[in-house]
Image (spheres, grey):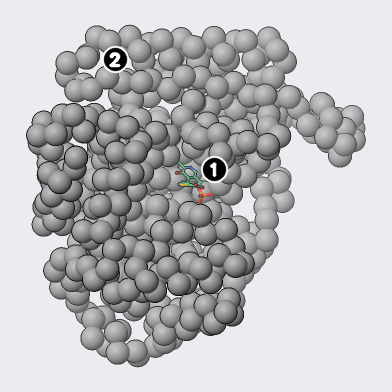
Amino acid sequence: MASSLLTRQLAISLRLAAPGSRYVSKTATKSVSEFEYDAPSMKTAVPGPKSQELLRQLGEIQNVGAVHFFCNYEESRGNYLVDVDGNRMLDVYTQISSIPIGYNHPALMKVMTNPNNVVIFLNLAVLGIVKFEDFLVEMMVWIAPSGMRRVQTMACGSCSNENAFKTMFIWYRNKERGYANPSEQEVDTCMINQSPGCPDLSILSFMGAFHGRTLGCLATTHSKAIHKLDIPSFDWPIAPFPKLQYPLEEFVRENAQEEARCLEEVEDLIVKWRQKGKPVAGIVIEPIQAEGGDNHASPDFFSKLRNIARKHGCAFHVDEVQTGGGTTGKFWGHEHWGLDDPADVVSFSKKLLTGGYYHRDELKPDKPYRIFNTWMGDPSKNLFLSEVLNVIRRENLLEVVTRSGKALLQGLYTLQTQYPHILSRARGQGTFCAIDACNDATRDSIMIKARNKGLFMGSCGEKTIRFRPALVFKEYHVHQLLNILNDVLAEHK
Ligand code: PSZ
């Protein structure tokens, strides 16, 4: 039974990839608004009977507790995700925010079916040793964060952060030993996981943060216990992240005090950990804490934090895995801070399709093979990314996001005014928006009811609904979203 399921999944992906298929010839020259559907269309509750049967089959070989439904990617278009029961949903979760320009975008389909690109898909290269062409030049010129000229690609967000942390540690130790060669003792002790070769350095992170689930990253992730339970970790400092009160304009003084309190705590922790013999080599932070509940802080907070990092000689790592790629209306979330010198390291993944991190020249590892693994990314993802960047420019998608984001946030404000007993704390930047329900059960029930009406949303934190649409999410999609949400809330008992 399980094998029939796997065959079916494979069949779907093969049909998608077939060059010159019915789908490609029909749509390859159209823009996303021309080729996608008009509206959601529902045939069953979700998961429908076909999804339920597939879930049962898959359940025999995998834990399916987190699987919502099965997708029909062949029929999905733009902002609409179609499931195996033929339900077409407006998708504002987009595979946890990782579909940059909608499903089956014609421009990416062209890249996929261009015979000249076949070798890139066929020959997954060891990018640390042999290179394909320089898609990286594109990445450097247009999207490099301010002050950063160097980039390293990696396979996923956790892998990017993990290597960014290592880069910061290497930089910190080189500074400490005055860029001299390591001692014999350091070389010997590193082989048995002992100091000084494996020094007691730390990374400071924030309560509520999510930076990934690999062992190093997990020590800086503090969003949910389920991520961390039973896994050994590092004793690294954790600062409070500001808990802002909404609406912001009514709590200016309180919020400024709250941010000052958190910054004070950061400095205290840096000093304490130095005294403990575990100096802070780097500070890592998300421009908006995403998994932790869409928690925002002001540009002033980030600017002061950046200064604290500099003052204490810590690298400043901005994790843009979820905020990067245009979703906030600027390419990087940190651009909203308005700083010339915003960070030392900026990591990315999700909407950029490849993972990786940018860093300042000073953080360049001193020898080859210090930051290395088999693939170090995937050339086909770089190829897709360069086309995604073309589409973002050609279709002015940062402006689209800004316009749609304003309409979305405005709509959420209206809904929370209409339903104050259910909704509060509407917030967002670009289309990276969120709203809180009164409790987690209500949040979950709203999400299921909305899904059955054709709106697929995400959750985060304890009781938050989050919106992570693709960059091709237009104002009429916003209206569809708000209408469905309004219907659900009107029916809510
Ligand atoms: O449950 C999970 O593992 C999830 S749900 C959402 C994510 C992970 N996001 C990934 C993520 C992120 O949002 C930030 C800010 N930093 C790092 C990561 C890790 O990226 P991946 O999942 O690609 O390893």
Q: Residue at x 15, y 29 (%)?
A: 420
Q: Position of residue 437 (x, y in %)?
A: 27, 34
Label 1: which secondary element? loop
Label 2: which secondary element? helix
Q: In the image, what residue type sits under mark 2?
A: Asn
For the residue pair 204 and 335, the one nearer the viewer reads as 204
The residues tagged by marks 1 and 2 sit, at their Cα atoms, a distance apart of: 28 Å
Find out if the beta carbon at label 1 lies less than 8 Å from the nearest ligand 1 atom. Answer: yes
Instruction: Determine whether 90 is above or below 345 in the image.
Output: below
Q: In the image, what residue type sits under mark 1?
A: Gly
Instruction: Determine whether 243 is above or below 429 in the image.
Output: above
Q: Position of residue 176 (x, y in %)?
A: 70, 23
Mark 1 Cα-neighbour bin, 10 Å: few <14, some 14–19, many ≥20: many
**Label 1 or label 2, whichever comes before in sequence order:** 1
For the residue pair 166 and 19, the one nearer the viewer reads as 19
The residue that disc 2 covers is 255
Residue 411, picture quadrant: top left
Instruction: Determine whether 350 is above or below 34 in the image.
Output: above
Residue 198, picture quadrant: top right
The residue that disc 1 covers is 212
Tags 1 and 2 touching, CB below 8 Å? no
Residue 183, picture quadrant: top right
Camera sees residue 406: no
Q: Residue at x 35, y 30 (%)?
A: 295
- Could you tell whether 13 is left or right of 160 in the image? left
